[in-house]
Image (cartoon, rainbow, N blue to C red):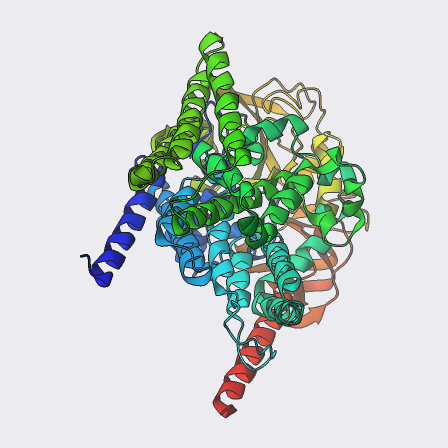
Amino acid sequence: MIKAGSAARFQHFLLAGSLLLAASPIWSQLLYFLYQPEAQFSDLTISHLPNAMYLQRALREYGQFPFWSPAILSGYPFSSSPLSGALYPPNWLAVIFPTAWAFNLLVVSHLFFGGVGMFVFLVHRAGLRPEAGILAGAAFAGMPALHGHYAAGHFTLICAIAWLPWLFASRPDRTTSIQPNFFRALSRPAICLAVIFYADPRWAFYSALTWLVLDAGELRADRLRGLRHIRGTVIGLAQAAILTAPAALPLATLVGWSTRQNLAAQDVFQFSLPPAGLLGVFIPNFARMAEWVLYPGAVIIVVCLLGLVFSDLRRRSKVWWWLVAGSLLFALGDSVPFLDSLSLLPGFNLLRVPARALLLTDLAFIVLAAYTVDHVLRNYPMPLNRAGRLILVGLASVWLSLVLVALRSTRGLPDAEILLAGSIGVLAALLTLIAFYRPRLQTRILLTLFLLSIVDSGSVNFRFYQPRSEEQVFAEGAEAAAWLASQPGRFRIYSPSYSLPQHTGEQYRLEQTGGVEPLQLERYAVFFSLASGVPADGYSVSLPPYRGEVVSTNAAARPEVARLSLLNARYLLSDFDLHIPGLDYVDQMGPTRIYANPSAIGEAWIQVDRLLGQGDLAPVPIHWTPNRVEIQADGPGILVLSEIAYPEWRVTVDGRPSTPLQMEPFRAVELEAGSHQVVWEYQPRSLWIGLVLLVTFLVIVLRQREGSP
């Protein structure tokens, strides 16, 4: 007889091993950056890697936390951007070591952490059997949708979603006393939601919505207790709002000045899941759109749908079927009549990519499969009714048809994965059917299904990734970047063809007028559209916008050299010829042509006329650090700094506060006659207000706890 302690240790060992196996497509390639097959870019190397590199450099060279970054967009509020990752503590591993293995290790550890959270939620919170929890934990760590997102570089999303099972687990169950009091104690779900917000604010919206859906299920089951759950949730959401204030208030300030606030319905629902994408429930989707990956695994679907035949199980798990239906409808976006009207609601109009809700669909499928496994194990032996037999035979027939199609197809590699997934689906459905007629084989069949689930997800997930060495990644644009870095002075670069990747630019400490960043300052976007000659046709995450092939889509645009000169764009890089008066051809390195702009003014200048860039412009040297710019300038005139204006920059002249002038999009201040010491300082008041709110709230909570009996 196995002792209880030994059984628990064995279960934990099995859980840990299964989680490591499920995440093997990443840790087996730990030293490489992982891209989608044949993809030119990844969000990881476009944004997260250069952000980590810049944060490390600012701390090392300037000895200060950088609230502002000059790397792209002629400068932007770095700490306010959710892509900076600066306020989520685990990300500091990548700041200390901005390498491929650091990011991969963070993702593997978060997948492991999320899988353990699924086990804790289902076994210790929902009371399911450990076998069900282990299956769900492994299915989470190997979820194809998560691996598809990471292949696209959605690093912060993986970190955020790993906390969602812990939010589920931290909710009070039916046996726990609910005493909602705003200042009495911190709500554990509120803490989890706050951590999710710090990891990725976009996923916090979906997490809060899921929290409300689960409480709505409690309301149906027990009205009185459900109402107390809802009240506790409202208090928890309010607590989470205060806990996230140091990040939420700066983000709200940035959003208010960004192009994001003007999203139209077509922008909000641009990447909705096509109705045909619903077939992804049964077959893996290897399209470039990571958001459209729906496949949860053949074993998960078989077991999940089998649960529909048990009436008492349907009642217990009804809320999770609500979550499946609601998330699928939301993911379909504008394919659903009248759903686009959500874009008119505050908050909804800031979201993009509704298909991201498919992650909730897969999570719900995994939970439903775990509930079914638990139900079957608790009621063995049990007969399988006609509906159950039809479901299993029907699923086997669907996947068998896919196998036959794959065998007859000559289209190439993707059919190999469809063939494997279809074969596993047929086998899973038949094994499940056999298990009901051969109770003695229950343990062996369950173990086989478990292994099939890992093989299925692993084969799919390996297909998502194409490893690239650090040498390959940092070789992109390196020859031109090395030449530019050898040129004297501080200047910016403009590239209509994205010839200087952002991670390479950061490696060589080069600053760019364009770049990829979802939250762009609206005033700068308008000015840059005129300077680049690329019209702002709707919302875009990049400046200039790329509407087709990146290297050629803007070939017909005519940059305006005068405005680029005000941006201190001394050099232009392009993968196509630029026949623009005022530019001097310098050299070609690989596919990249280098052009010099001799009329670039410099970092700052004095002008007499109030019209931007008019009259005689006298260049002025500056002393720059991320949060402070010092200038010694002679008046009278208007001192214009070739840096982007933002409301949290404050200016003093000779130590006295001064009023900035509106010289869009630049910072400017008027000087009287004589020599003056001008200092611009970044003072993130929204951050300080958020910190004060957070500290005050925590102090009150601690005092309330000390004073409580």
Q: Quadrant of residue 492?
A: top right
Residue at 51% x, 37% y: name it: 385
Q: Residue furthest left?
A: 1
Can residue 647 be seen here? The reply is yes
Query: Vertical placement of 249 versus 115: above or below?
Result: below
**Residue 31 at x, y percent in the picture:** 31, 37
Q: Quadrant of the N terminus?
A: bottom left
Residue at 53% x, 32% y: name it: 391
Depth check, front residue: 422 or 387: 387
Query: Vertical placement of 590 versus 217: above or below?
Result: above
**Residue 462 at x, y percent in the picture:** 38, 29
Q: Is residue 521 left or right of residue 279?
A: right
**Residue 648 at x, y percent in the picture:** 66, 62
- How many numbered callouts? 0
Depth check, front residue: 291 or 199: 291
**Residue 631 at x, y percent in the picture:** 60, 58
Depth check, front residue: 95 or 566: 95
Can residue 447 be seen here? The reply is no
Q: Is residue 340 left or right of residue 222?
A: right
